[in-house]
Image: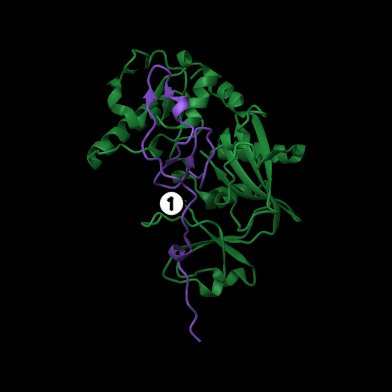
């Protein structure tokens, strides 16, 4: 009987990330993004190390 | 000097705690906005408002997730040149003993296997194997194992390998595998290290559908998935000794709690930590701000 072999690629799944449609405006005076426009923005980073909202809560792997 | 990206919310939280006048935020993804003068003997960076920092007044430097942001619409050559300069500025500070936290590429020089070797002196560690052509898999015997990722990288289809239970007999020999014994655990434990302080939290695994809590997070700020726990003096001493051996005073250690005790899984030199204390009940952001400003930032 042939056993179907698995690969790491087959095991990979989509991380729980939401891609932001556009970056939040950054303010050099306050040195942060405008807080009142940050509420629903989540940012995806390509290495999958983190996707997080304005509160710093990660949505996927936290390795750096 | 806080080397980061403009969209990073942790950096924003730290600036709120530290005060904007005490921090210079140098955003990699907005490099074009800054004026930089950098010579072997002197450097100065100014933002568009005139707020500046230079090699004479910098008191500390913290790298936080800068390269996790993209330079949009830039030639690869330009991206690499800019990265080089950011790294050089960071290392300028490191050579003068001014850096806090860990370098962004810490794990390029100290990866999971070597860290497990160090951790085994202070904690129980799981049987672990990295293999090509399934070398060493036979020594795992009847042990149930999970497949993990070293890099947490993404495939070309933007998927990630989360911790997954696998049947050793079905592993394709043409691929690299990172295998670890499957631990039957009732709770994940994570310890955030900030200077001399340790903040340990626990997360119940009872409601997990899979094996990896990172794949099943509740993003509701009120959910409080992680609860602060007190650990024994022996545990805290082991954490301290492990960190001293590794030469770090920052990062996050992941453990699992099982019937056999607490088992070390991995150390993340630049792991996220704000998610443990979103409501700031436990003083993590305040603690980090204090740590960063112990020589100023």
Q: Residue shown at 45%/32% (left/top)?
A: B8
In green, which chain?
B
Q: Is residue B206 visible?
A: yes
Residue B79, percent from left and from top? 28, 37
Closer to the camera, B87 or A30?
A30
Which quarter of the rendered picture does the N terminus of chain B lie within? top left
Residue B100, percent from left and from top? 50, 27
Secondary structure at badge 1 equals loop
- Residue matched to label 1: B153
Classify residue B113 as left or right of residue B173: right
In purple, which chain?
A
Q: Quadrant of residue B34?
A: top left
Q: Quadrant of residue B65?
A: top left
Q: Residues within 10 Å of mark 1 (few under 14, many from 20)?
A: some
Establish if B60 lies above or below B180: above
Classify residue B273 as left or right of residue A44: right
Q: Residue shown at 66%/36% (left/top)?
A: B240
Residue B154, percent from left and from top? 41, 53
Closer to the camera, B80 or B165?
B165
Establish if B215 lies above or below B226: below
Establish if A9 lies above or below A5: above
What chain is tagged by disc 1? Answer: B
């Amino acid at each position: 009987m042939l056993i179907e072999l698995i690969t790491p690629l087959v095991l990979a799944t989509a991380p729980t990330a939401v891609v932001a449609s556009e970056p939040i405006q950054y303010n050099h005076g306050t040195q942060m993004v405008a807080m009142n426009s940050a509420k629903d923005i989540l940012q995806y980073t390509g290495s999958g190390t983190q996707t997080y909202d304005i509160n710093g809560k990660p949505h996927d792997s936290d390795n750096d | 000097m806080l080397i980061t990206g403009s969209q990073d919310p942790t950096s924003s939280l730290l600036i709120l705690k530290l005060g904007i006048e005490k921090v210079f935020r140098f955003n990699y993804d907005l490099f074009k906005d800054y004026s930089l003068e950098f010579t072997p003997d002197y450097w100065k960076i100014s933002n568009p408002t005139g707020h500046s920092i230079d090699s004479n007044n910098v008191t500390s430097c913290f790298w936080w997730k800068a390269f996790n942001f993209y330079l949009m619409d830039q030639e690869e050559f330009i991206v690499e040149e800019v990265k080089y300069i950011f790294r050089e500025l960071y290392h300028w500070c490191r050579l003068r003993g001014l850096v806090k936290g860990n370098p962004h590429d810490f794990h390029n020089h100290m990866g999971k296997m070597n860290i497990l070797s160090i951790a085994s002196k202070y904690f129980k560690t799981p049987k672990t194997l990295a293999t090509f052509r399934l070398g060493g898999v036979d020594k795992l015997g009847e042990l149930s194992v999970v497949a993990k990722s070293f890099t947490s990288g993404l495939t070309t289809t933007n998927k990630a390998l989360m911790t997954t239970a696998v049947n050793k007999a079905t592993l394709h020999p043409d691929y690299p595998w990172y295998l670890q014994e499957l631990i039957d655990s009732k709770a994940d434990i994570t310890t955030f290290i900030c200077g001399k302080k340790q903040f340990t939290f626990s997360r119940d695994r009872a409601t997990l559908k899979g094996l990896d809590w990172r794949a099943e997070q509740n993003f509701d700020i009120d959910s409080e998935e992680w609860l602060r726990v007190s650990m024994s003096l022996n545990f805290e001493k082991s954490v301290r000794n492990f960190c001293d051996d590794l030469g770090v005073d920052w990062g996050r250690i992941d453990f699992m709690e099982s019937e056999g005790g607490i088992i070390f899984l991995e150390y993340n030199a630049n792991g996220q930590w704000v998610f443990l204390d979103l409501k700031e009940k436990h003083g993590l952001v305040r603690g980090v701000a204090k740590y960063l400003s112990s020589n100023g930032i």
